[in-house]
Image (tube, grey):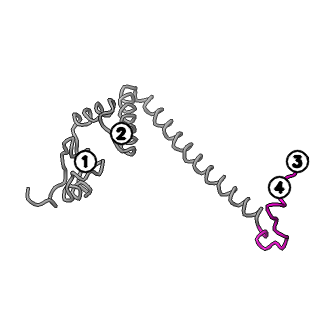
């Protein structure tokens, strides 16, 4: 295929994939541009297996963002695998529990935001008017404690 704009899916070998995720200069600008476009990137399971083995024996370093992504993929696969083994009734319970956890995470995020807003508000209220205060400023000597 001579026209790169016609490519919709691209199979990457292990090295090209590693160059891409590590932003390695060995990957040409043209290849990098293609990989960053809206095409579907495909990597075979053997490449992921090879990467996992090299990473586990410290023969390969990966960007933290990829490691986190890879761990979440593994967890998602494990959850999906276990879920498929359950009867439909229990699958529904798992779905309800996931919805519960999603709502809990959202509430906790909202609570943290609300706590921060109240803290900022309280601090602003406590400091209110002090910027225009005509009281004398203290020197460092005024703040030193004398021990007898």
Q: Nearer the viewer, mark 2 or mark 1?
A: 1
Q: Nearer the viewer, residue 63 or 143?
A: 143
Q: What residue span does the magenta drawing correspond to?
A: 128-148
* Label 3 element class: loop
Which secondary structure type mostly characterizes the magenta part of the structure? loop
Image location (x, y in percent) of residue 136? 84, 70
Image location (x, y in percent) of residue 112? 62, 50
- Which residue in the protein does label 2 denote? 70
> Mark 1 and mark 4: span between their CA atoms?
60 Å
Is 7 placed above or below 108 here? below
The disc at residue 147 is 3
- Which residue in the protein does label 1 denote? 19
- Reading the chain from its start, which is encountered first: label 4 or label 2? 2
Q: Residues within 10 Å of mark 4 (few under 14, many from 20)?
A: few
Q: Residue at x 82, y 60 (%)?
A: 141
* Label 2 element class: helix
Image location (x, y in percent) of residue 108? 59, 46
* Label 1 element class: helix
Q: Residue at x 21, y 59 (%)?
A: 29
Judge from the rendering whether residue 24 lies leftward or rightward of residue 89; answer left or right. left
């Amino acid at each position: 295929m001579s026209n790169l704009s016609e490519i919709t899916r691209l199979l990457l070998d292990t090295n090209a994939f590693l160059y891409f995720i590590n932003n390695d200069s060995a990957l040409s600008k043209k290849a990098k541009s293609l990989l960053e476009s809206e095409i579907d990137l495909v990597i075979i399971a053997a490449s992921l297996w090879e990467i996992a083995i090299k990473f586990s024996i410290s023969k390969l370093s990966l960007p933290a963002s990829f490691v986190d992504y890879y761990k979440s993929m593994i967890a998602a696969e494990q959850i999906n695998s276990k879920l498929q083994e359950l009867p439909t009734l229990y699958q529904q319970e798992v779905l309800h529990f996931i919805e519960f956890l999603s709502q809990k995470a959202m509430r906790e995020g909202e609570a943290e935001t609300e706590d921060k807003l109240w803290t900022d508000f309280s601090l602003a209220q406590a400091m209110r008017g002090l910027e225009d205060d005509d009281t004398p400023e203290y020197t460092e000597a005024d703040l030193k404690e004398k021990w007898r």
